[in-house]
Image (cartoon, rainbow, N blue to C red):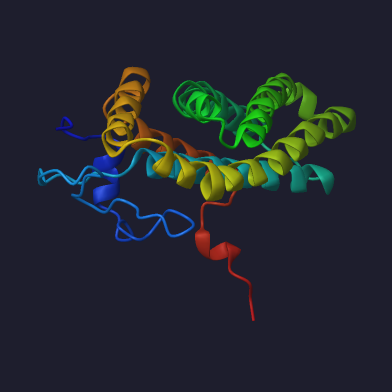
Amino acid sequence: MPRSVVSRRRFLENTSWLGGGLMAGGSASLTAGQKPSGGQETGESEVSPTEDLMREHGLLARALLIYDEVRSRLESGKDAPAPAVAGTAALIRRFVEDYHEKLEEDYLFPRFEKARQLVDLVTVLRQQHQAGRRLTSEIERLATLASLQTPAGRNQLVEPMRQFVRMYRPHKSREDTVLFPALHHLVSAKEFDALGDEFEDREQQLFGKNGFESMVGEVARLEAMVGIENLAAFTPRP
């Protein structure tokens, strides 16, 4: 029986949209309070490890919107706050690259390689993780007040952000629609359930009890710095 689920799982318990079908291709996803092994209910809200990864992709998607906004400003000759760019790169480095992607590299990719399933896809995903880390290093190097004060510095920063966004939107989409649903069929129900506990242990070790919630708060703060915190602003006008 899995231990008590906290952090992201408690966060998800409070969201009104939890419990919908999440796996592609007709795969059955876990709903609140249901274990993949069909065990007894514990009265706590649980989600699958792949749903956890998808929620983290949602956080990445919000970071990509910040890069979009900054790049649009720089390309049109407008100013952009260097701390917002540096802060977004730091969040991506810490939460996405050093945590989320490490989960995939340590727990998911080896299982597909061992089973000789989706090996070509996994190879590309690994390569893109490495490319993403190089781009993040470049963004961190260029996201300074001095760099953004010159046209040359602004132009240099635009390109790695553009490449990062262009790569990661299809990257996370392939994982959400191909890799993650396939994992549900690749491992046993018991192993699938254990992965969720393993992911939660790693998150708490790195970020504390409310790690995911704190990262959501951080990305919201960064959105406000570039003026895209209002969701309604993205709605097209008639």
> Which quarter of the figure has residue 193?
top left
Q: Residue at x 51, y 29 (%)?
A: 115
Q: Residue at x 67, y 41 (%)?
A: 67
Q: Residue at x 38, y 40 (%)?
A: 52
Q: Residue furthest front?
A: 116
Work out which quarter of the rendered image holds the N terminus and state it.
top left
Q: Residue furthest bottom?
A: 238
Work out which quarter of the rendered image holds the C terminus and state it.
bottom right
Q: Position of residue 110 (x, y in %)?
A: 51, 23
Task: Please tell me which residue lies in front, 27 or 71.
Answer: 27
Relative to 39, 119 lies left or right: right
> Which quarter of the figure has residue 205?
top left
Q: Is residue 77 visible?
A: no
Q: Position of residue 7 (x, y in %)?
A: 27, 35
Relative to 133, 79 lies left or right: right
Total number of numbered labels?
A: 0
Q: Is residue 5 visible?
A: yes
Q: Position of residue 21 (x, y in %)?
A: 37, 59
Position of residue 101 relative to residue 170, above or below, is: above
> Which quarter of the figure has residue 18?
bottom left
Q: Residue at x 61, y 28 (%)?
A: 89
Task: Please tell me which residue lies in front, 50 or 39.
Answer: 39
Task: Please tell me which residue lies in front, 118 or 79.
Answer: 118
Position of residue 104 relative to residue 8, above or below, is: above
Relative to 73, 18 lies left or right: left
Task: Please tell me which residue lies in front, 121 or 153.
Answer: 121
Relative to 117, 39 lies left or right: left
Q: Position of residue 138 (x, y in %)?
A: 74, 22
